[in-house]
Amino acid sequence: MDDKGIVICSADIDEGLTLQIWTKGAVPRLGVLNRVKNTRKLMPFSWLEREDRTISLKGAKGKTNSYTVESLEEPVRRMLYQYAQDPVFKGLLWHTVIFMSDLLHTPRAIFDRTEFAMLHEDKRCRLWLLDLTEGDEHGYFRPFFPRMSAEEIFGDAPGIFADGGKTVADLKKTGVTRKLASAAPSRWYDTPRVAAAAALLGFSLFYEEGNSLSSFLWSAVQNGVPSKAALAIKPDDPAGAVFARKMSGYVRHWYLLDSIQYEIDLDSFETLKKRGFSRKQRLTLNAGDIGPVEYTVTLYFNAEGRMAIGCQPIQLTDRHKGEMIFTLPAELYETALDNDSFGGARDDYFSLSSILSAKLFGMWRERVQRFANVFLTPGA
């Protein structure tokens, strides 16, 4: 302990470097202690998300030692496992998983059947639509996502009878979210758990800064105990709302993601032309759709029924070097357009940005989970 906070646990890397988990009772930081000079630097855990980063420390006689993120991963995982035994963190994590699950499953109401023909984007990005077109007493929570056979739990009904309920709490009372989590735990259970761990530990929220949401979650700890009532008051946090939308898009397009290949290339047009793809369509995705800058996005198709998407950033971005290329079977894109329409008009812009964002979200989740899965075990 020092005048700034508490060192929860530490790991000696060698004679020159010790890693620490440091906290003041809120979002923890990764402490980097130079044992030779007895100096310490505190960094957010989001620093670990970039695998190409290194730590360079000057030691005795001016010698510089460098450490890659990969070499530090296992010591950090061990420290996080120790940290997770803290009863305050463990309790807050459980409450935050529920909080993230609520964000994921929050429905939007439809009062007029004509809305289904051209859904507003705020409703199109939801996983559940509350169908009140026949009146409150005949309302249904209707699923707005593709399902595998084990997730087909609705029978002949259009969804789950709302019985007068309208909120996410009412939806959960029906037991449908538990059934989905049991049928496909990695999709429905692990997603909010990884999101909760990211927010509490100080990782990014899908590469965006999430300090506001993290501070809100930690402020729910009152007298050493997480307050359910405090977490019930959702913060007015634009970053959190954007993250919830991205998380929902990831879950919706879950079954497409393994069929989408991702790569980085210096010239997507020339590369795809050499592979036999022909350019068919071009559009611009706004900043925030798939990254912090605008992208010129070009759709390509080949004679074998495959589709390629070249994404050229209009401005430089530190997310990646060069241009992003996504390839997938063309028929999957057509299926996604239908799934995102709810039987109404298809929207290329919405579906394209959602699919690409979902693939990138999956890569982010996989990276964060490498650190968080040491304590995100079933039943923990």
Image (cartoon, rainbow, N blue to C red):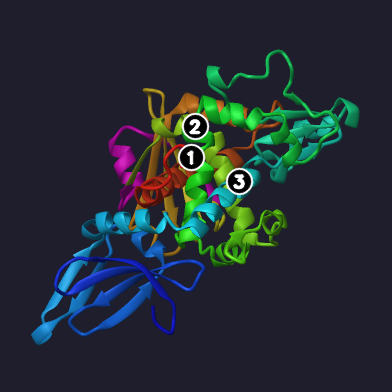
**Residue 339 image-quadrant placement:** top right
Q: Which residue is mark 2?
A: 185
Is residue 322 in view from this perspective? yes
- Residue 171 tag number: none
* Closer to the camera in the image, 148 or 289: 148
Tag 3 secondary structure: helix
Work out whether residue 89 or residue 156 is closer to the camera in this orientation and state it: 89
Residue 143 drawn at (x, y percent): 67, 29
- Residue 282 colored in magenta in the image: yes
Q: Residues within 10 Å of mark 1 (few under 14, many from 20)?
A: many
Q: Is residue 2 above or below residue 45?
A: below
Q: Which residue is mark 1?
A: 190
Mark 2 residue crowding within 10 angstroms, few (<14) / some (14–19) / many (20+): some
Sequence-first tag of 2 and 3: 3
Instruction: Give the percent coordinates (x, y) of residue 204.
Output: 47, 59
**Residue drawn at point x = 74 percent, y = 25 percent:** 160
Report the magenta residues as a range: 264-285
State left or right for residue 86 relative to residue 192. left
135 displayed left or right of 194: right
Find residue 98 and name its label: 3
Q: Secondary structure at mark 1?
A: helix
The reply to whether callout 2 and callout 1 are in contact (CB within 8 Å) is yes
